[in-house]
Image (cartoon, helix red, strand yellow):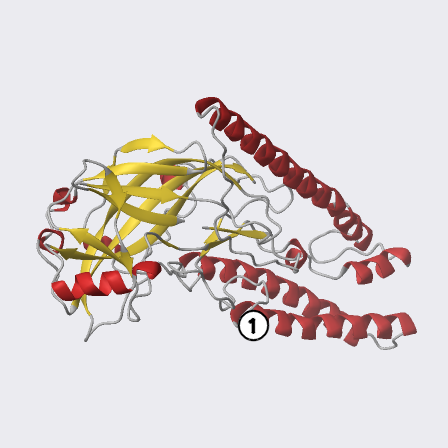
Amino acid sequence: MWISIQELNEMGEYTAVELHQAKDVNTGGIFQLRQGHSRRVQVTVKPVQHSGTLPLMVEAILSVSIGGVTARSTKLQRGLDSYQEEDLNCVRERWSDALIKRREYLDEQIQKISNKQEKSEDDMEREARLVEQWVGLTEERNAVFVPAPGSGIPGAPANWIPPAGMETHIPVLFLDLNADDLSANEQLIGPHASGVNSILPKEHGSPFFYLPIIKHSDEEVSATAAWDSSVHDSVYLNRVTPQNERIYLIVKTTVQLSHPAAMELVLRKRIAANIYNKQSFTQSLKRRISLKNIYYACGVTYEIVSNIPKATEEIEDRETLALMAARSENEGTSDGETYIEKYTRGVLQVENILSLERLRQAVTVKEALSTKARNIRRSMSTPNVHNVSCSRLDLSACDEDDKVCKCEIH
């Protein structure tokens, strides 16, 4: 999600304000806002191509709100950003619960074989396989709670160099969809939308105000909203910012997803601002010198996780279940299912994989049709004009691990 702020200039036009870089700021930069000027906030949201296995498509921006105004000392306090671990902790907790359930099952099966007076070769082979799976659980649990950089596991440290204006840390949003068909377990809209409870630190410092959306872009999923900063009644936004102070706000955006499921998603981006009255001679000179390195937008990249891996919820490896089923072991397990039933249920998950692939193809076709429709509208609105195709720098993090169905959005 990218954020830019526009102000009314002397020509009566809204133009993007400058974003200055600073080492102590983790939000991507500091917006330079003129005291008392009329402003607009532009929000742009788009999925990162080839960033995961989850088919994700953003239809529209439904609302934009801003609030959480707070001031921080550059000398005494640490800077803020858009990172939170609410959803990441939820993913880890659900994943851990599934691993605990699987470990209890393996303990039961290993104990069952150990209690036999005489063990056959099949029993010894099965015991060795179960012990191997038990050891693998410990490794998986360590990988979940302390993931290696670039491992593709949610919460893994960012192993990348973000473009200018983009935050380094990547927060996680957990959709909690059905692992079989990626359907929503409930109607995820309004107060039940995903991301509603993904609260940022200092978010409740001041109230949020919904901004009236003035226009939507035909080129991309983007909306421009009017922002009257006087509604906050905040001294930090009304006065000139002292040199040793940083002003932080939070822009909260609700977007409509069509894939993987029809649902709403709440995204947050913390921004830093500096209120000035008139640029000093020193600031004006610095601006002329660094004219080539002026930026106008800052952003944050989210990692969207649809569900915990389906394989983690299986209590035993399919290979072991296949061997037990082939030996006609009809003895029921603790949950009442036979080994044949468990193996059959695992095999049927191939259909789920095919359903996911059909969903990806549907997203690809829909994106192609949307691009074609935008090109047609552009051609009809600007006849006899050569359109130059300009591509924005995209974040690409190809995920080779198909165990976690996820995607990235910025």
- Badge 1 is on which residue? 148
In front of the other: 224 or 351 = 224
Number of labels in the image equals 1
Q: Quadrant of residue 335?
A: bottom right
User: Is 186 situated above or below 123?
Assistant: above
Residue 270 location, x and y as percent? Answer: 30, 55
Q: Quadrant of residue 308?
A: bottom right
Q: Secondary structure at mark 1?
A: loop
Left or right side of 39 for 95: right
Crowd around label 1: few <14 · some 14–19 · many ≥20 (10 Å): some
For image coordinates 28% across by 52% down, the residue present is 250
User: Is 212 situated above or below 407?
Assistant: above
Residue 78 location, x and y as percent? Answer: 26, 71
In front of the other: 343 or 336 = 343
For image coordinates 65% across by 70% down, the residue present is 137
Does residue 115 appear in the picture of this structure? no
Q: Report the amino acid beneath label 1.
A: Ala
Residue 41 location, x and y as percent? Answer: 28, 43
Left or right side of 196 for 114: right
